[in-house]
Amino acid sequence: MINTQDKHLQKMIRLLTTAAANSALYNPEHRQVLRLNKQALNELQQLFNLHGNVTLKVIDEKLIFSNQPVENNLAVERLLDALAKNGISHLQIDPGVYAEELLGLINILSKSPDKQIDIKNSENIHYGQIEIRYKDAGSKQFSGLDLAEIADYEADRFMDIYQSVRNKQKLEMSGINEIVDGFVNAFNSQSDAFMAIAPLRSMDEYTYTHSTNICMLNLAQAKVLGIEGQLLNDIGIAAMLHDVGKMFISPEILSKSGQLDQKEWEIMQQHPRLGAEYLLNTPGVPRLAVVTAFEHHMRYDKAGYPQTSRPWKQHICSHITAISDTYDAMRTHRAYEESLEIEQIISVMLDLAGNKLHPQLTYSFLQVLSELDKKNEPSNYTTL
Ligand SMILES: [Fe+2]
Ligand SMILES: [Fe+2]
């Protein structure tokens, strides 16, 4: 069981790495960075209350806190990576650390190794350095963030936003807008829209990552259909928020490994309605996001949920989202099922075209997918 200390430590690491990611993506003074920095400082205070100071060491590529290895996850890996790139083997943060000092640490963590940065101890933060070695120098380019990295960063940031919904706080629409703007810009700089979805991720934090995956898949589909401008952004925003209703479903049901029983399934089926109601009452949410949250499980043949008592015409964005959703569910490894090979995915989606999924949109999706498949090296198949 996770204890209070681990909880604060994990949260602090997640906030710091997310702040560093945002700092790299936007700028070190971005208000999102400042907000995360403040939250990280709060978590540090909790740790100081339990511990005196906070010392993190890297031993054998593992993060050690209080003589114990820290449980590994995406944020811890990211911290280890950033520390390694800067040659930091030891980090000590003393009580009394203030916001500007912590921002200095975030700045170091956010730097690419191609940028030289002087790592100097500050009043309450001390760095132990080893000679810098790059594990795979030359094989990786750091000249700019690619879509895969943006997806990683934004998944973290989105996790924060989603978490605040679960905690009954207001949805931060400006954050969602910025995330989608980042994706749209990244897409616009790609010559081939569908090449951009190659780096889709499958990770543990399913719902969060799922939403960023759906966003990229929706944008790719919309771009192929020639959709641009505000509608393109709205389709991306709708994707990010399509499953927001899941935040009102208990985590036990959401993360249950195995089939849901009848009662649990009925509860799960409430998420489109709950999401739509929530979004309807949230200022700044595009109407399309409300509609998509409500309709994304209706199915093309309307045999899905929710059922409506009167004739209903679904928005194209809901059809697009259902296609993205189906594809992502099949290609993402979940605890209780194996992810499928691309050939199997294509064959299942062809079977679903015309009943669960909109046929023409599905053919268009698969057409580009198979082109992408041809262009990719065999080693990239697993990332599809
Ligand atoms: Fe859903
Ligand atoms: Fe979904």
Image (cartoon, rainbow, N blue to C red):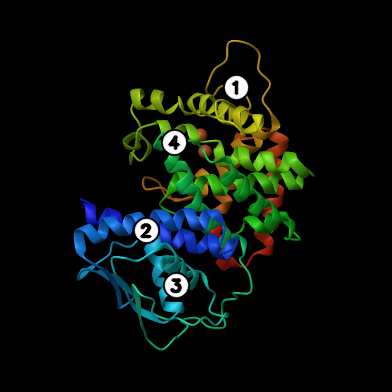
Circle number at residue 41: 2
Look at discs 1 and 3 and give the one toward the viewer: 3
Front in this rendered view, residue 169 or 336? 169
Looking at the picture, how far across and down is residue 219, in whole percent? 67, 46
Task: Indicate the amino acid at tag 2.
Answer: Leu
Discs 3, 4 touching: Cβ within 8 Å: no
Specify whether 250 is left or right of 147: left
Earlier residue among tags 4 and 1: 4
Instruction: Using a 10 Å C-alpha cutoff, classify the residue at mark 4 as few (fewer than 14 neighbours), some (14 to 19) or many (20 or more).
Output: few
Alpha-carbon distance for marks 4 and 2? 20 Å
Pointer 4 residue Cβ closer than 8 Å to ligand 1: no
Instruction: Using a 10 Å C-alpha cutoff, classify the residue at mark 3 as few (fewer than 14 neighbours), some (14 to 19) or many (20 or more).
Output: many
Q: Which residue is mark 1?
A: 302
Look at discs 3 and 2 and give the one toward the viewer: 2
Q: Name the residue at 46% across, 70% down.
A: 104
Alpha-carbon distance for marks 4 and 1? 33 Å
Q: Name the residue at 57% across, 83% down.
A: 138
Q: Which residue is mark 3?
A: 82
Look at discs 4 and 1 and give the one toward the viewer: 4
Above or below: residue 83 compared with residue 23: below
View extreme (bottom): residue = 131
Q: Which residue is mark 4?
A: 169
Discs 4, 2 touching: Cβ within 8 Å: no
Look at discs 4 and 2 and give the one toward the viewer: 2
Q: Quadrant of residue 269?
A: top left
Look at discs 1 and 2 and give the one toward the viewer: 2
Alpha-carbon distance for marks 1 and 3? 48 Å
Task: Indicate the amino acid at tag 1.
Answer: Lys
